[in-house]
Amino acid sequence: MQKIGFILLVAVLVFAGCLIGCASTSEEPEKNDISEVSSIIQESPASIENLELKTIEITTPKDGIIRERYTCTYGSTVRSFIVCKAAQSSPKALVLMLHGYAGSGESFMNDISFDEKATKKDFVLIFVDGISDPDDKTSAPGWNSGIKDSPKDDLGFLKSLVGIFQKKFGISKAKTFAAGFSNGAFMVHRLAVDASEVFAAAASVAGFLPESVWNRRPEKLSTAFIQINGTKDDVVPMNANGSAKYNKNPAIEDVLEYYRSANGSADSVKYISIEGGRHSWPEEKFCGFDVDKMILDFFLERK
């Protein structure tokens, strides 16, 4: 029945000549919603086009969570992502979830239990698939975080994507967040600096701010930030263990001090350093606390 409903929805959109439609297995968007979404994407350098529900096989309402895979075209590139939300409630906040290098939105979703905890608190999550750089011989998916020159407009795509689902669910910037691991966390740092007007808060697990973004940092920001990494993480440059001395990227302590100053509040930044922790998403049995809950609580503290 859900598949039939979706096919009918696509037919209506094609007949109306719409370039974009947000398909849902649960409800059909009204015409006003579609026109409002279109006005948002037209403000971007490129447009998100042909947004559609690609498959419903990933939908598993038995655990109370609906997971829907979407595809779309941004510029000339096909992009994809998974939207997770509670089956029995309307989302009140949004989190953009960015995986590490060579990962995917689905693998990130499956590797952690963030969606199970977040949807119970009325968050909708968007697990986005990165794409590879043209000059990357491995063809591994990742993010244009500013570590190197890249033609990928991940920044424009992610901002446009968030705008669509903010409008779809009626979620404001005050309840819009981003979280990522490793390369995805590098991108989260970039979002905090280059898209501060979009996100109320951001969470980096085992990530750092790339030098190129640091060098153009503005004096003022409006994005709160939580950083979590281990003291033995060999990727994150730190003053505490001396690794920043040999790294061109700024020490994480200096970055967080900048965030505090740029936001004008010490409460806007939280730093969790895990003794002995390495480059990973920390497990509670190792670090002694629930990382997912800590991130969600930090987001929920935003007004």
Image (cartoon, rainbow, N blue to C red):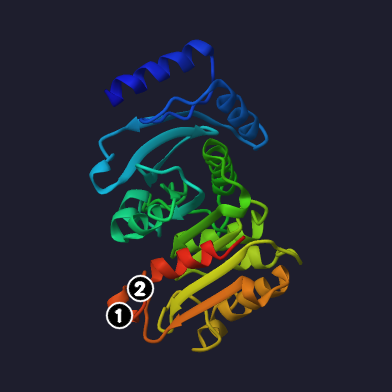
What residue appears at the point 36 percent right and 54 percent down from the top-left corner? 115
What residue appears at the point 53 percent right and 70 percent down from the top-left corner? 226
Mark identifier at residue 282: 2
Of 145 and 122, nearer the camera is 122
Mark identifier at residue 40: none
Left or right of 297: which side holds 167? right
Residue situated furthest left in the rendering: 62
Q: Amino acid at mark 1?
A: Phe
Question: Of helix, strand and loop, which one carries label 1?
Answer: helix
**Percent x, y of residue 51:** 47, 30
Where does the C terminus fall, quadrant-wise? bottom right
Assess disc 2: are there few (<14), some (14-19) or many (≥20) residues with their C-alpha within 10 Å of its C-alpha. many
Left or right of 13: which side holds 69? left
Q: Is residue 147 visible?
A: no
Q: Are marks 2 and 1 in contact (CB under 8 Å)?
A: yes
What residue appears at the point 61 percent right and 35 percent down from the top-left corner? 46
User: Please, is residue 256 above or below residue 299 in the view?
Assistant: below
Q: Amino acid at mark 2?
A: Pro
Residue situated furthest front in the rendering: 88
Left or right of 181: which side holds 212? right
**Percent x, y of residue 136:** 43, 52
Residue that label 1 marks:
286
User: Please, is residue 182 above or below residue 89 in the view?
Assistant: below
Residue situated furthest bottom in the rendering: 241
Where does the N terminus fall, quadrant-wise? top left
Question: Of helix, strand and loop, which one carries label 2?
Answer: loop
**Percent x, y of residue 24:** 40, 30
What residue appears at the point 59 percent right and 24 percent down from the top-left corner? 32
User: Please, is residue 108 above or below residue 27 in the view?
Assistant: below
